[in-house]
Image (cartoon, helix red, strand yellow):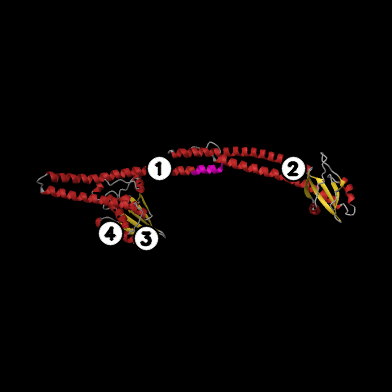
Amino acid sequence: MRLSTRIALVTGSVLVLGGTAIGWSTALITRNNSISDVDTALADSLASTSPDDPFGIVEIAQRSPYPLAASLVFDDSAPIPLVSQFTRDGISLMPELTTADFVAAQESPRSKSTRGGLVRVVTMSLGDGGWLAISSSVESIESRYRSTLALALGASAAIALLLALGVSWVISRQFRPLGDLLDSVREIATGTYVRKPIRRRAPREISELGESLDLMIAELSTAMENRIDSERRMREFLGDTAHELRTPLTVIRGYVEILQRETIVEPDVRNRALDRLDSESQRMTRLINDLLLLAQLNEAPNEPVQSVDLCDVLHTHLDDLRSRDPERAISFMAPESMIIQGRPDLLERLMANVLANVQRHTPPTAPVEVTASMSHDTATMTIDDGGSGMSTEMLERANEGLVRFASERNRSAGGSGLGLPIMHSIVRQHRGTLEFSHSPLGGVRVTITLVTK
């Protein structure tokens, strides 16, 4: 059952019950008011009658706005009618009363059934076992109450039913835009990440639901694009990995075939072959080690952290760079210490990769400026070089981690080509950020921000 139908049924049921209750209450109040008027007339008539002259009720009954019947009763003798009232069928409206009835009706009027219908009775004690009983028929009031109740209930039910139908129509109309959203959701399930516009004016809640659905569609679309891009990068990465592994394997296989094919190998050829076999095997070892490190970094961190002074790490690797490039101008500005919580081996590897890239991609005389600062919860390091720099597209790819293996020119420097992915993974594990941008020195600026705790 649709939600709109269910709401319409519930609303209609409530309206029918409410209308019935109102009709019944209205009829009941009218009945009780009419009976109260009769009781007032009976009480006034009784109050105007003296116990010493009960026959005065005859004159009082003539002035009463309601037809009254009165009779005298002494002990267990037959009642003596003073004022008689009969139905159209000739049935007396004075009921037969017991001693208990006389006592009960003395305080206030009581209802009593007769063959002619319901009457109200009030009594007065005359002393010596004598009683004066006065009655008035309320059968017309009861009849009017029953007919009014039936009419009120019927009218209330009819009105409530009409209102329920109207509410059902309004609800179904208000819920129609929700059907458009449901159609969009079904299309999203099939892979269409575009929501159809709502064809009708929608209530505020449904409009907000549509806006939330738009946000969800945008997130799904972005997630799908990221997934596709991630799969593409993974294919490129696996292709590059296979290529990088195949190259040294091809060299090793070639020299092995030479050594196997030649029965007598010249010493120079044998030494050259052994040197190439050794260098290519070392290159494969470095590549496999970097792949293993990258895989470990992408897993949930489980190694304990320690207090690490980033200034000591920077001093150590800058000294290594000075020793390798004595002609390079290197400046370093930092506080005395920058203590953070991290893994020393990974932070050492991070700075080694950053400065190794500087050495590989810049001339040995290109200047390098390193600045470091620390706030209450972050430590920031900026490395500028005076090399030829990178294009804006290459910087964007470096910031996103979309980097291919090193070119042939850089392979001779001993790199595996996994430096940037490893750097990004190390920084992410320390809850930091890594950014590449244009440097004021003309080359590349590397900005590393790490969380201290």
Q: Secondary structure at mark 4?
A: helix
Q: Which mark is residue 340?
A: 3
Q: Is residue 281 found left or right of 308 in the rendered image?
A: left
Real-space CA distance between mark 4 and mark 1, rounded to the nearest whole angstrom = 46 Å
Q: Secondary structure at mark 2?
A: helix
In this picture, which residue range is highlighted in magenta?
A: 202-212
Mark 4 or mark 3: which comes first in sequence? 4
What residue is disc 4 on? 319
Q: Secondary structure at mark 3?
A: strand
Q: Is residue 205 magenta?
A: yes
The secondary structure making up most of the magenta span is: helix
Between disc 4 and disc 1, the foreground one is 1
Q: Which mark is residue 224?
A: 1
Where residue 63 appears, as percent x and y from the top left, is 87, 46
Where residue 158 appears, as percent x and y from the top left, is 67, 38
Viewer-closest of 217 and 320: 217
Q: Considering only vertical position in the picture, is 440 above or below 190?
A: below
Q: Circle 2: is it few (<14), some (14-19), or many (20+) Cα within 10 Å?
A: many
Mark 2 or mark 1: which comes first in sequence? 2
| Identity, as a three-letter code, of the amino acid under mark 3 | Ile
| Identity, as a three-letter code, of the amino acid under mark 1 | Met
Between disc 4 and disc 2, the foreground one is 2
Q: Which mark is residue 145?
A: 2
Real-space CA distance between mark 2 and mark 3, rounded to the nearest whole angstrom = 90 Å
Quadrant position of residue 236: top left
